[in-house]
Image (tube, rainbow, N blue to C red):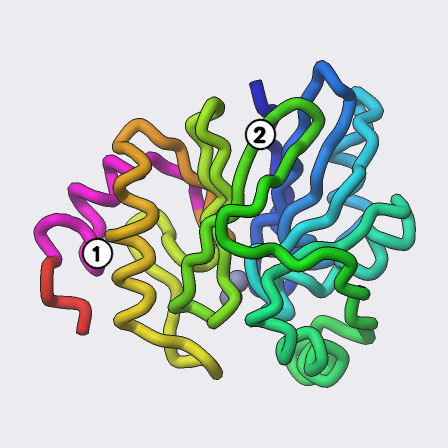
Amino acid sequence: MLVVRHAVVGPFAENTWLLADPEAGEAAVLDPGGEAGRVLALAAPEGFRVTQVLATHGHVDHVFGADEICARTGAPFAMHDGDLPFLAALPAQAAGLGFGAARAPALARRLADGDPVRVGRREGRVLHTPGHSPGSVCLWFPEDRALFAGDTLFAGSVGRTDLPGGDGEALVRSIRERIFPLGDDVRFFPGHGPAGTLGEERRGNPFVGDRARGRFL
Ligand SMILES: [Zn+2]
Ligand SMILES: [Zn+2]
């Protein structure tokens, strides 16, 4: 079973997730928004080895800490290449938004739709879910019934689509056609705010739930 922990980091209260396979002693850090020491402390009790650093998308609140965590762990950084322009803009955006000085992480691996993401022996895969940004992805672990949703879907809300490259219609399609069909029982872990289940959102989300059809756009 995948072990899931998180720390809320940075000026935008972003959720950085630690995904670990306790049998293999391996972990991935997802969306390292900063505060590298607190994030790495999530892996400390069992001494999990952080072997990869992943991002659901390229916004500064999700990648600000990536370069430092990669440097401290030796782990490679992976993201969808649709958000590469945000990485290029990271140092300027970080300074302008109050994060402080930052270096963009080197992209060691490009995540594309359907690609496998393995954490130890836990098997996940990439779902490309554009809308919040062109390169937004979710990470889906079918056996663990767990979805890491980034800023695509929140408990009771959805990601904003007014930033560069945002697309409201694409966001609704991503959620209704790629995420909800995974199943009502699936737990989802978003980029901000509390975790929940897909069933709660399918039934009650005011933007994309069953009773919201047509209202979002
Ligand atoms: Zn975002
Ligand atoms: Zn965010």
The extreme top residue here reads 23
Does 37 sit left or right of 196 as displayed?
Answer: right
Q: Residue at x 47, y 23 (%)?
A: 143
| Image point (41%, 58%), residue name | 129
Query: In the picture, residue 194 is in which quadrant?
Result: top left
Foreground disc of the pair 2, 1: 2
x and y percentages locating residue 132 in the rendered image: 42, 68
Task: Tell which of 182 and 44 is nearer to you.
Answer: 182
Q: Which is nearer the eye, 195 or 147?
A: 147
Residue 99 in the image, given as x and y percentages of width and height: 71, 71
* In this rendering, position of residue 191 left or right of residue 79: left
Q: Residue at x 30, y 54 (%)?
A: 175
Q: Is residue 33 magenta?
A: no
Q: Which residues fall within the magenta stretch?
A: 194-212
Query: Where, quadrant-wise, is the N terminus in this rendering?
Result: top right
- Name the residue that disc number 1 marks: 208
Q: Is residue 207 magenta?
A: yes
Residue 35 picture quarter: bottom right
Judge from the rendering whether residue 161 lies leftward or rightward of residue 126; answer left or right.
Answer: left
Image quarter of residue 3:
top right
> First in sequence: mark 2 or mark 1?
2
In the foreground, 45 or 20:
20
Q: Mark 1 falls on what kind of element?
A: loop
Secondary element at tag 2? strand
* Label 1 packing within 10 angstroms: few (<14), some (14-19), many (20+): many
Q: Which of the labelled discs sits on residue 154, or is there none?
A: none
Give the residue type at disc 2.
Glu
| Residue under label 2 | 123
